[in-house]
Amino acid sequence: MNMNAFKIEDRLIGPGQPCYIIAEISCNHEGDINEAKAIIDAASEAGADAVKLQTYKPETMTRNFGTRPKGTIWENTDLFSLYQKAHTPWEWYGELKRYADERALHIFSSPFDETAVDFLETQNVPAYKIASFEVVDTKLLQKVAATGKPVIISNGMTDYLELKEAVDTLRNAGVKNLAILHCNSGYPAAFDEANLNTIPAIEALFGGPVGLSDHTLFAKPESYEAPLAHITAVEAVKKGAKIIEVHLMLDRAKARSLMEKNEGGFDWPFSREPAELKKTIDMIRAIEAGKTVEYETELERKTAAITHGSVCFEPTKREIASRSVRPSLWVVEDVKAGSPLKFCGGKPGNFDSIRPGGGLHIRYADQLDGLSASRDLKAGEPLEWDMVRFA
């Protein structure tokens, strides 16, 4: 086995192997387990290898502080309400796992806090995915690493040092099987910010396997026109991607209507419909078989060309707003002056790593744990250095 290759269950991923295709369900189930099952059916029929869930509860992702993610497609709803509507009920997992197993699909998840990891371990997941927003949650990375399972991580929004810190955190905590997915966390991402030339650079700097988590969809992203869902993934495979992850939904028009009413559909601007996923996978398999794949239109050819971009280890223009939603350290219970600070991390405490940004980086959680508050602190305050007594 190539030292950079690893297995997820029975499937070897890495050099010389077919591209591993992950269909992300995310919130596209719209709160209906039958919709989730229909997405699994669509993933299977399109030829995907795996489906992926997201595991969190609204109160573990954030707190009900009324925070709105300005500058993003979700700025018209506060984060707590968003995650109430978007989360996947944990009680679904066993049934969905059986459903996926029957269709020979792997199923695993992105956990968003430590309690989600504990739960997923009871479900015997074969691997973990770290979402781009959680790359900065070093405490979560350590928790995932302790499982000993393969880890796939996306680099969306990160700069080089943030990505290196995440990779080092995982490897130092024991991860031996790690794949990095290049990702642009604009929602939707622009084709001219895909910068697929970063894929071979990631492999050279960090090792493989490498891949792509793709949020591009529209050739005209500002107006949500001209969907070209297959382009970036196909071009990424030409650059050496061995894992492709895309969001899958059943009906874009229906989901768009739900989001316009703030009732659901929150991932519609960057999710594929089944026929688009099948087209993507068919083209990838043709490339792997040594066939020449031609684009049908001039727009496709022009769009494909601009996805290559440059080697980029900095957030792009469309990613800047997304960075503000990444988790940081927040006060989650009132703390009296002089009382000790205690990091939650899935346990009782008074400060925690939750969305959005604004507080101290999570890398400082261990150093702050056990120190005392310099003044009375209120739940809902981002944790800052001047709130901490050091002597």
Image (cartoon, grey):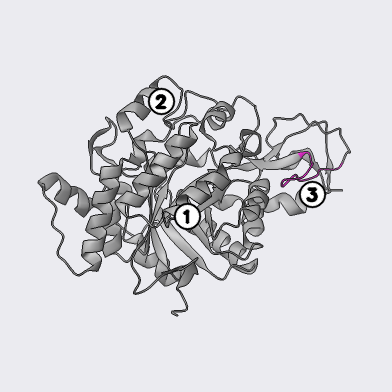
Q: Position of residue 106 (x, y in %)?
A: 46, 57
Q: Residues within 10 Å of mark 2 (few under 14, many from 20)?
A: some
Q: How many marks?
A: 3
- In this view, 376 is above or below 12: above
Q: Amino acid at mark 1?
A: Asp
Q: Position of residue 283 (x, y in %)?
A: 22, 57
Residue topped by disc 2: 259
Residue topped by disc 3: 369
Is label 2 in a helix, a strand or a loop? helix
Judge whether residue 171 is colored magenta: no
- In this view, 136 is above or below 13: above
Q: Amino acid at mark 2?
A: Met
Q: Position of residue 164 (x, y in %)?
A: 53, 62
Give me the disc on residue 101: 1
**Mark 2 vs 3, N-terminal side:** 2
Q: Residue at x 60, y 24 (%)?
A: 66
Is label 1 in a helix, a strand or a loop? helix
